[in-house]
Image (spheres, grey):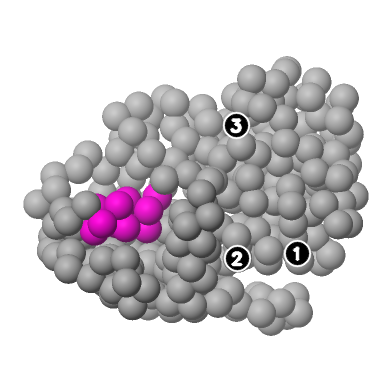
């Protein structure tokens, strides 16, 4: 199958090419040639490449940046997502669209399922929810597209919370992390693996796909530092808890946005590994790359 990844040079997008290579042809056009906010250019790119499936990883994911620039957030996360879906439909192609736990308000205090009502608190969450709606826009027949909500991504192709925590710990800096917000840390490699498995299904609608289990950023930072100690890299860094109120950021965050799926089993797929197991694997990989380099 010919599969095009928009945002293919980002943290999640870069995971796909090696995973798809054994059975599929992966196309990863640059932002310059595949800007999802340029509908005409996007249609030209799709017409020339003729994908059968599009995985839309392109997004404006700076949560506070979206609050400062709502026009850009809506242009990329809402209108851009709709552009991808409409351009794909002209070719009869499906879309896997990546969305976020920030479409919820965090008041449930239990993991959110695909059936739960949305109520985003921030411009980022609002723009991503509107993107979901535009991708799944009602047509003459049920939409063939799939919206995949995930949370707290980290991976080797872009500096992230895990990397920053490791770097600060190794530099002997205190690590300040929010203790009141809870969600599901998700390694992009594991997420991409399961998305590749979804290609063989006819899944459509909305699907939650995130690391199993939940924690706060504070708990995650402590877990990262403890793993550094086990590997002999660093075990003395201090982890200090804080709150979003103290940090005084522009955007509100949902305080409990953990995700769980009621649909994976019916699709014949297993949940992603626990966030602790994923963190173990990622940190071993990160350390092996650093030693080899």
| Residue drawn at (26%, 66%) of the image | 234
Q: Give coordinates of residue 6: x percent, y percent.
A: 67, 37
Q: Give coordinates of residue 37: x percent, y percent.
A: 60, 24
Identify the residue under disc 1: 198
Q: Dot 2 lies on which element?
A: helix
Q: Is residue 260 left or right of 173 when viewed as pictured?
A: right
Q: CA distance from mark 1 to mark 3?
A: 23 Å
| Residue drawn at (51%, 27%) of the image | 75
| Residue drawn at (33%, 77%) of the image | 230
Question: In this rendering, which labeled residue sits more in front, label 1 or label 3?
Answer: 1
Look at the image and say whether residue 161 sits in the magenta stretch.
yes
| Among the two numbered marks 1 and 2 on one chain, the one whose residue lies closer to the N terminus | 2
Identify the residue under disc 3: 80
Q: Which portion, as a residue range, is magenta?
A: 160-170
Q: Is residue 68 left or right of 276 when viewed as pictured?
A: left
- Label tally: 3
Q: Give coordinates of residue 188: x percent, y percent.
A: 56, 57
| Residue drawn at (68%, 66%) of the image | 194
Near-viewer residue (157 or 123): 157
Identify the residue under disc 2: 190
Look at the image and say whether residue 162 sits in the magenta stretch.
yes
Near-viewer residue (113 or 141): 113
Q: Give coordinates of residue 78: x percent, y percent.
A: 54, 36
Q: CA distance from mark 3 to mark 2?
A: 26 Å
Magenta stretch, main secondary structure class: helix
Q: To which quarter of the image does residue 135 belong?
A: top right
Q: Is residue 142 visible?
A: no
Q: Dot 3 lies on which element?
A: helix
Question: In this rendering, which labeled residue sits more in front, label 3 or label 2?
Answer: 2
| Among the two numbered marks 1 and 3 on one chain, the one whose residue lies closer to the N terminus | 3
């Amino acid at each position: 199958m010919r599969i095009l990844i928009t945002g293919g040079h980002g943290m999640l997008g870069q995971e796909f090419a090696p995973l798809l290579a054994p059975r599929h042809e992966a196309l990863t056009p640059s932002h310059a040639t595949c800007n999802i906010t340029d509908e005409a250019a996007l249609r030209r790119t799709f017409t020339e490449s003729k994908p059968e499936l599009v995985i839309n990883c392109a997004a404006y994911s700076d949560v506070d940046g979206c609050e400062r620039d709502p026009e850009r957030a809506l242009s990329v996360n809402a209108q851009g997502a709709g552009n991808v879906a409409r351009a794909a439909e002209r070719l009869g192609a499906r879309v896997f669209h990546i969305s976020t736990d920030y479409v919820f308000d965090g008041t449930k205090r239990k993991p959110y399922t695909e059936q739960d009502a949305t109520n985003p608190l921030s411009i980022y969450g609002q723009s991503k929810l509107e993107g979901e709606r535009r991708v799944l826009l009602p047509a003459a027949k049920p939409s063939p597209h799939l919206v995949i909500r995930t949370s707290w991504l980290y991976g080797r192709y872009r500096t992230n919370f895990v990397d920053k925590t490791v770097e600060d710990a190794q530099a002997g800096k205190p690590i300040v992390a929010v203790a009141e917000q809870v969600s599901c840390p998700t390694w992009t490699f594991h997420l991409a693996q399961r998305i590749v498995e979804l290609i063989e299904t006819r899944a459509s609608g909305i699907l939650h796909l995130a690391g199993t289990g939940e924690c706060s950023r504070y708990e995650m930072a402590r877990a990262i530092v403890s793993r550094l100690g086990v590997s002999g890299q660093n075990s003395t860094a201090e982890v200090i808890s804080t709150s979003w109120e103290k940090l005084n950021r522009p955007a509100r965050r949902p305080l409990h946005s953990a995700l769980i799926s009621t649909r994976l089993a019916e699709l014949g797929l297993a949940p992603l590994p626990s966030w602790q197991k994923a963190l173990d694997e990622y940190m071993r990989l990160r350390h092996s790359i650093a030693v080899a380099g």
